[in-house]
Amino acid sequence: MSPTSEQLLTYADGALLLSHRLSEWMSNAPTMEEDIALGNIALDLLGQARGLLQRCAAEIGGDEDELAYFRDSEAFRNPLLCELPNGDFAHTMVRQLFADAWFAGVWAVLAADDTVDADVRGVAEKAIKENAYHWRHSSAWVVRLGDGTDESHRRTQEAVDALWPFRGEVASDEWYARIEPVLAEATLTTPGRDAWTQRGSADGWHTEHLGYLLAEMQSLARAHPGASW
Amino acid sequence: MSAWDVLATVPDPEIPVLSVVDLGIVRAVDESDDKRRVVVTLTPTYSGCPATEVIARDVRAALEASYDEVDVRTQLSPPWTTDWMTDAAKEKLRGFGIAPPAGRVTLPLLNTGAPAACPRCGSESVEELAGFGSTPCKALWRCRTCQEPFDYFKVH
């Protein structure tokens, strides 16, 4: 069955907001190399979001900028995970691990779906390879931090505990199968697959963090509608 | 000059040693019978690569000298891959100080490859400094022999 524009919007909004969150690290990352890595990943996600938003706009009206900059929080369909604040570096990496594992499944399904139009399939086929590099980065960091010093282990475990309740909108058997070996190698424990989870974005319910993110992301476009340079 | 010859003179803005033809992003060129109109189809390298729009603009500008009407189109599927770079292009990269992609893409992309040798001194003793580099297509590596850091064009 071909994905609905609502489903595509979920993927597009997830990529867009996660891209914005990662961009908040620019000039603040622990090292220069990490600044560059997070910038690159943010750029890939932004490109993926644009490709899908253009497709969504063709179906539901407007253009990619209107969808990105002129919708309010209740119209966003991203998994809550993607809008959560960066926290410390361990928190950002665990969030990225969870999101990368979700996107891996998303892109694989879209790329293999014959009913999807060529442009969406093209976005997915491209994103599969980009995602592989993102996953390589996030999983390496989670293992290094979790199986690192007492301090890095403590912070990474705190990140897993804090983010685990937000896995509900991205988790599947496949997702757990990707995540669990990494967390085990990182000597981290999880509350388990049956633990309670938060949901809401499908109905337009978001965390309190999204409003602040949108205020920053959208203010320029709203102050100068249609501006270009 | 044919449209392909013109395109062979349009450099990649980030890696000017390569033309857009070397890079393998030109998918099709269709000239009208009277040679006044041309349609060029490009495939972007990376989803968010900022060079994509610059390349489309440069391609248009280069062809407008020879054609009345230039149409630059984008085709996303099948996606660009480093497998489409010619061997000559890889040699140009090496000469420019960038280690070319080592190996072909196989999905799932579990083995992301490693440069065969330092592009400066040829030593095979190299190590990765960072998986991401100065542009989306590159990673940062270092030669253990000459100690020089260098860019590696990732298998993609």
Image (cartoon, coloured by chain):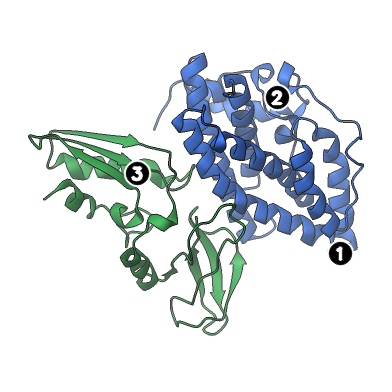
Chain colours: A blue, B green
Q: Residue at x 42, y 57 (%)?
A: B83
Numbered label attached to residue B8: none
> What secondary structure is found at the residue carrying circle 3?
helix
Horizontal and vertical percent position of residue B28: 27, 42
Residues at marks 2 and 1, CA–CA distance in whole angstroms? 35 Å
- Residue B14 quadrant: bottom left
Q: Which residue is mark 3?
A: B54
Horizontal and vertical percent position of residue A7: 63, 24
Q: Nearer the viewer's eye, disc 3 or disc 2?
A: 3
**Mark 2 vs 1, N-terminal side:** 1
Residues at marks 3 and 1, CA–CA distance in whole angstroms? 45 Å
**Which residue is at the front of the view, B2 or B17?**
B2
Q: Which residue is mark 1?
A: A149
Which chain letter goes with mark 2?
A: A
Q: Which residue is mark 2?
A: A211
**Marks 3 and 2 close (CB-CB < 8 Å):** no
Q: Is residue B144 left or right of residue A196?
A: left
Quadrant of the drawing holding the C terminus of chain A: top left
Q: Residue at x 50, y 52 (%)?
A: B136
Which chain letter goes with mark 1?
A: A
